[in-house]
Amino acid sequence: MIMSRGFFALAAAATLLAPVAASAATAAYWRFEDGAILTDSAGSNDLSANGTSPGAYVLPESGAGSAFPDPILGGANGQAADFSGNNGFYATDAFNFGSAMTVEGFFNADTVGGYLLSQWNSTGGNAGASWGLGLQNGTFRVAIAGASTVAANVTLEETIVANKDYYFAMTFDAGVVTVYLQNLTDDTAMVHGVRDVSSSITQLVNSPHQLTIAGLTGDNGASMKAGFDGLLDEIRLSDTVLSVDQFLVSVPEPSSSALLLGAGCLMFLAGSRRRR
């Protein structure tokens, strides 16, 4: 069960007395807070805008984003980034994680579709494609590519509902892919599924392409497609496999949910309806 914001404030204070996984494992952490919407709070990977800069969205007491909690690492969560489906962010550098990574954050989809994050070239036969996370056919999907294979698609069979707040995470551990999802608005239990693709993929592609937030990476950071329409917040990348108790949210052991695996390139169709 997701706890209240008050609980997270107490939990954040308590973590000062114990080691916190904030740190060496964190490759980048974009919080989208006031005055620092482009800033990587963990390092030097500040973002640039693709086209019109996504808007700053102050988290309300009710409605979209109101269930995004304060992260257990500490610090109040007061603002998210608001994307229209036609704009996004990209990082200056490519991230190359090899055999271990964790990606996590919060989202609220105005239109259920598009990529949340990707390092996946959308042109040239997907040359240099590495990984992408997004929404397709009402579900949460992950695409990963290995050095000697085109791609594998992993789908978490949990229906995504528009205008509800979610926490998501994906870990990659030498070919073992674990996907996590929690509906924060309805305060339901976190679900997860595990799929072992190590027989074909043990290392992510060493991609030259820049990481893109709220879209599919194009030829370069300034071009993208399959844009996400909605809110994104507290996006953290780690260069190791985090355990559940190291995630941005504090939850009990998640329940299982079915995963489907398929071969081939993952293509998302995203709506371009402007947000509220």
Image (tube, grey):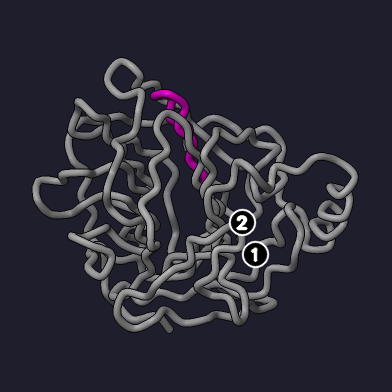
Taking the magenta stretch, the answer to whether it contains residue 247 is no
In the displayed image of the protein, which residue is found farthest to the left? Answer: 124
From the viewer's side, name the closer residue of 270 and 82.
Answer: 82
Q: Position of residue 42 (x, y in %)?
A: 60, 57
Magenta stretch, main secondary structure class = strand
Residue plotted at (66% across, 53% down) = 187
The residue beneath circle 2 is 184
Residue plotted at (35% across, 77% down) = 84
115 shown above or below 224: above
Instruction: Report crowding for label 2: few under 14, some 14 to 19, many 20 or more residues within 10 A (C-alpha).
Output: many
From the viewer's side, name the closer residue of 206 and 30.
Answer: 206
Range of the magenta residues? 169-178
Query: Please, what is the three-letter code of the amino acid marked with disc 1?
Result: Ala
* Mark closer to the chain start, 2 or 1: 1
Residue plotted at (50% across, 72% down) = 38
Labels 2 and 1 touching (C-beta < 8 A): yes
Q: Tag 2's secondary structure?
A: loop
Residue 137 visible within the image: no
- Relative to 223, is 250 on the left or the right? right
From the viewer's side, name the closer residue of 188 and 250.
Answer: 250
Q: Residue 67 carries which label?
A: 1
Query: Please, what is the three-letter code of the amino acid marked with disc 2?
Result: Leu
Disc 2/disc 1 C-alpha distance (Å)? 6 Å
Image quarter of residue 256: top right
